[in-house]
Image (cartoon, helix red, strand yellow):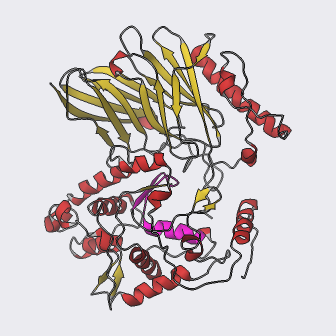
Amino acid sequence: MNARLVNSGPAVSCFAVLLLAALAFPACAADTVPAERRSGYAFMGRETRAIQDDDAANPGMLWVLEGEALWNRKTGPAGRACSDCHGDARASMKGVAARYPAFDKTRAQPVNLEQRINLCRTEQQQAKPLTYESKDLLALTAYVGRQSRGLPIEVADDARTRPFLEAGREAFNRRQGQLDLSCADCHDKRWGKRLAGNPIPQAHPTGYPIYRLEWQGVGSLQRRLRNCLTGIRAQTLDYGAPELVELELFLMSRARGMSFETPAVRP
Amino acid sequence: MKRNPDRHSARREFLLAAGGIAAGIALESAAASPPTPAAASRAAASTEATLQAIRKVTGAAPVNKGKVTVVLPELVDNGNAVPLAVQVESPMTPNDYVKAIHVFTQKNPLPDVATFRLGPRAGRASVATRIRLADTQTVTAICELSDSSFWSGSADVVVTIAACLEEL
Amino acid sequence: MARAIVNLPASAKRGEIIEIKALAAHEMETGFRRTQYGALVPRDIITSFVCTYNGVEIFSADFHPAIAANPYLAFSTIATESGTIACKWTGDNGYSLTESVAISVA
């Protein structure tokens, strides 16, 4: 294993040494989906789970409510609201978020929910696209995501999506960064074990956008992935990068059948 | 979240001073392995700040241990939002009720967390919220009853730091 | 931003103890954080919460920076009569927000 430690502070090098010591094993490129799949929900303490379970206590619901208001707000020169075309989201958006990222025929590539919403905004509402991680975009994805709560994750695995799925799978299994780790090293092979006191989950995107206690706010799957890449000291990817969408697609596919929990609460 | 190098050395010795609030606040033990002088003085200073904050509320009145239950997870998922509940045994009648509940921490930058004012209309002396905890420590709740007596309860919590440093 | 959510039963029996849950959207900037340049980010928190039942105060709370972001409160009251339960949050920099919910008591 190629170990290049750059001493960027006692905290990081201490953590890195800890990690490398724990991960002395031959590299294995096989796709090892955990035999027993569990949502990040299962790795949280009872009290944090209680926050997610109670809509009156779940701070993610503040974003969901805001998303509902935005859904009904007319925007753009055409003065069109999402509801003008899509009606009541409770009906029209049911199951939608659970099958994203989805293949976009025009662009011949998968797009995630954020990109889909922005495509609607630019093409149907003639409005400016919303910035990634902006309050409005998070609110809309939280609101649309909420309409899939309780439904099984179901992204398409067909001739069109397969090349992108495979690219995502390859990225998931690839060692990278200064810490020379792949996603699989922690999330397939060491889930359930602890990293500096915190349990390692299996990395199933079952509740995005999540209210993350660490962020003290709601954030997207791409934000989390960018943070993970920074965490292993790899060059992070820009929001909206095709490689991130491919990884999202793979992760959702890996979580196929699991229940959607948006808006989830996570540590 | 702050990193505390002494987090690993959380030895506690509860003083058996009768009715003393300090009994509920953890102090470093000299018996196991001695804390560094700096750590010991930091711990002492933080406890002193907490005691002073408590005294501002209770004045010279004695504080009895009992009636108050502080409910906290033993190991928090994240110190940014720790669910806290405080329950007080009280009939909550117009003659015998909880006037206020004050919550204090031992190692946060400020000892005061919140004050909750109830009354007989509450029906039940029970409040819940979410708090920030900077480090492994003891959280203390002081309750003031309608007869102006003070009662206290506390709970210990372990707070770790997030594993992956996300920001550069 | 949806600014607050107040949750309580729409109806209750007279004398029944009901639970009220109140959630407000607020970053609760502690005043202890520093920017990457070392400057202190000034405190900006909700400092006070008051709940009234048909105009009569039934519960209040003082918040300090140790209250988590998007502050949550759960407390109880006895359902005495039909009317309005109003929750008011006030804080630094002139922050003020009221959210009212109707209750029907039989």
Residue B24 is situated, as x and y percent measured from the top left of the image, at 65, 26
Camera-side residue of B77 and C40 = B77
The span picked out in magenta is: A208-230
Q: Is residue B96 above or below residue A212?
A: above
In this rendering, would B52 be left or right of A149? Answer: right
Q: Quadrant of the N terminus of chain A?
A: bottom right
Q: Does the magenta segment cover residue A215?
A: yes
The residue that appears at 23% across and 22% down in the rendered structure is C54
Q: Is residue A192 above or below residue A174?
A: above
Q: Is residue A36 above or below residue B133?
A: below
In this rendering, would A235 be left or right of C99? Answer: right
Camera-side residue of A139 and B22 = B22
The residue that appears at 38% across and 58% down in the rendered structure is A135
The residue that appears at 60% across and 18% down in the rendered structure is B56
Q: Is residue B56 visible?
A: yes
Residue C77 is situated, as x and y percent measured from the top left of the image, at 32, 24
Camera-side residue of C93 and B6 = B6
Q: Is residue C25 above or below residue A180?
A: above
Q: Does the magenta segment cover residue B18?
A: no
Locate residue A241: give its quadrant.
bottom left
In this rendering, would C25 be left or right of B158? Answer: left
Q: Is residue C45 visible?
A: no
Residue B104 is situated, as x and y percent measured from the top left of the image, at 58, 29
Locate residue C8: give its quadrant.
top left
Residue C27 is situated, as x and y percent measured from the top left of the image, at 46, 46
